[in-house]
Image (cartoon, rainbow, N blue to C red):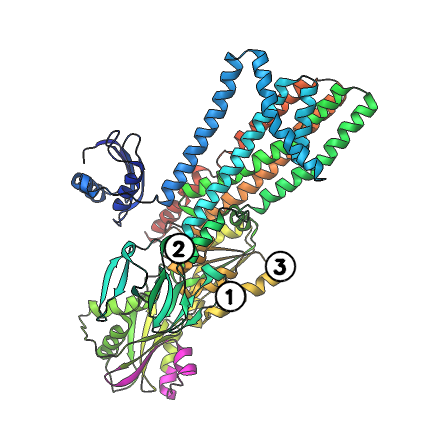
Amino acid sequence: MKYQVMYDNGPRLRVRSGQWAFTKREGYGLASLLLNQSFIHEVLTSHRNGSILIYHDGDVESKQKIFNILDGITLDDLFEAEPTQAQSSREITDDFYLKLSKMILHRFVYRIFLPIPVRNALTIFNAAEYIWKGLDSLTSFRVDVALLDGTAVTGALLQKQYKPASSMMFLLSISDALEDYTLQKAKSTLKDSLALNIDTVWVVGEDGEEKQCPAVDIDKGDKIKVHMGDVIPVDGKVIEGEGMVNEASMTGEPLAVHKRPGKTVHAGTVIEEGNLIVEVYSMNKETRLNKIIDLIENSEELKADTQSKAEKLADSIVPYSFIATALTYLITGNSSKALSVLMVDFSCAIKLTTPLSIISAMREASDNRMMIKGGKFLENYANADTIIFDKTGTLTNATPKVVEVVPMSKRYNRDEILRMAACIEEHFAHSIATAIVKQAKEEGLKHEEDHSEVEYIVAHGIVTEYDGKRVVIGSKHFLFDDEKVKATKTQEKKMDKEAAEHSVVYLAIDGKLEGLICIDDPVRDEAKYVIEELKDLGIENVIMLTGDSESGAKASAKALGITDYKSQVLPEDKSRIVEELKQDGKTVIMVGDGINDSPALAAADVSVSMKHSSDIAREVADISLLSDDLYDLVTLRKLSVGMLDKINNNYRNIVAVNGSLLVLGVLGVIPPSTSSMIHNLSTMLFGVMSTRSVLKDEDYSKGIEVEAIEVADIS
């Protein structure tokens, strides 16, 4: 591919290949091709001039790899594809700005070049739509904004006030365009969060062998294998295997459902445990998930409560506008003064500024790599007074390390315990399992597959047969309460000692305790500062939930300055705790990243998933953080609170300005044309002010400052 570098600074690279280099859909395919690389985070293409904007890791090595890829692309490599969420979002924004530009251009061109009689005729023509909507409200006995708008436009035309009527309709059309844009952006984000981004699947052949194939090549009747922790990519019937499937994205129910042969599964649901072989019924756009996505197009549930309240407020003001207009006419007998009152429409400014404030905040969130599924979740985040953190992977770096291995009998030595644990745990991507496998590898403790198929019990542990013996590894609760493993008094003393200092994984063979694996997972450097700032920003209750031992939880809570924490918490307990807090009148934020956090995420008023969250956590969460900086939670709080402050300030300013115009109009100080002009100009000004950024420069750099403080403390 021939291209020219147009911009190259840090993680942002733009190249241009010129017009006709690729079509619009080929541009989507090109973006898809580049996004297969882990060091490339976002790609935007423009077929109009062959522009490719690439966001990457920002280092020299990544940049050189990108150039190598671009150099190697030929015409044969181009293929058509669907747009990414970023591309769709960009196109929605571009279309809105294009529509807005056309509206403004047409208005000024008409005013400059068209004769006054023609302009007046166009005003009457455009007024027909508003008059018709007003008549519809009148015949339906609805006293709403449409009736007020229609009456105001009609009154202005009867008074031959064509210019004020035209200005009013222009602002109303901008308000409608903004509201449509707000909903399209919210729907686009939600649809992407539900859409499946699965490139390959495991297809089971007639001979029983598994083969990895592109997801687009699947046909009805094919058999695919879906492993634990994976998203199911199709609708189908289970023909082999058993498992627990979380269907929260489909049904809203947080608890997993048992699936066995003969049961139906749906695309977008996630296997919490077990493996399933599924016969494909439907895929792609035929799945139930995609039918739900289509229904989103007609959904009004994405609006923030604030926006809905603004629309109701606008409607509730209408009767008072009519009453004020009627009283003015009855008292003064002057239709011009009455029209001055009617032309001052509070609802116009309210309807314009509220969606603008919300979409502006969502844009800022997107710029800060935070994906929000709807304005109402941003509002809930601002109003929340309680935040619950999962510990591992959220308040910690999710990179635990084995610090000690303690044999509990003479039957197995330290190395044998670690080797055996690594052999069993290597089948799972859990952070503690990774730590055990890594430690064995570093010590050169190689192992062979001496065990049968493993059974993973979520939030508890693992059961398998090793060298003909039943082996269990996991939490203390799992071994001693569920598996009824016995321990001697000497062993209990050792357990108490290690559990007081570390998080402990227990290993038993044939019902006897054989080893302890002691693990530490230090808290994130910035976590304490983040919690302090959240408290300063109005979060009254900070709670930490963890499945770890009491000693490990206590040590972490003390390091973080958290007084309210609960240890050895099961997934269903997390959900119950969230529900209890909500029943006590708390507005709850839940922050988590694992499969076992999904019930609590679904139950919270607003839920947040971290960058490296499991598939199911991202599916359930209302807000997804796309960076690994915990300080984003503080930034999000400032942004959401700032959004509501902006909306409330708009309300006060709108009432002050328009209230003054009403008084001046009634007193006859200003004519209807002046009243309308000032009203329209102030509405536009409020609209522009609503697009201003909430966050300041220091809000973006705080995470870096926290890191600098830590470095200074260490030195």
Image vertical order of residue 360 relative to residue 331, above or below: below
Q: Which residue is mark 1?
A: 575
Kind of residue at badge 3: Gly
The residues tagged by marks 1 and 2 sit, at their Cα atoms, a distance apart of 33 Å
Does the stretch in magenta take in 477?
Answer: yes
Q: Which mark is residue 176?
A: none
| Residue labelled with disc 3 | 585
Q: Position of residue 377 (x, y in %)?
A: 52, 50
The reply to whether dot 3 and dot 2 touch (C-beta < 8 Å) is no
Q: Residue at x 25, y 77 (%)?
A: 420
Q: Quadrant of residue 411?
A: bottom left
Counting from the top left corner in percent of width and height, residue 624 is at: 42, 52
Q: Is residue 17 left or right of residue 585?
A: left
Number of the front mark, 3 or 1: 1
Image disc number at residue 286: 2
- Give the distance between the C-alpha atoms of the residues marked 3 and 1, in whole angstroms: 16 Å
Q: N-terminal of the two: label 3 or label 2?
A: 2
Disc 1 packing (10 Å; few <14; some 14–19; many ≥20):
many
Q: Quadrant of residue 366?
A: top left
Q: Over which residues does the magenta segment extend?
A: 466-493
Q: Are marks 1 and 2 in contact (CB under 8 Å)?
A: no
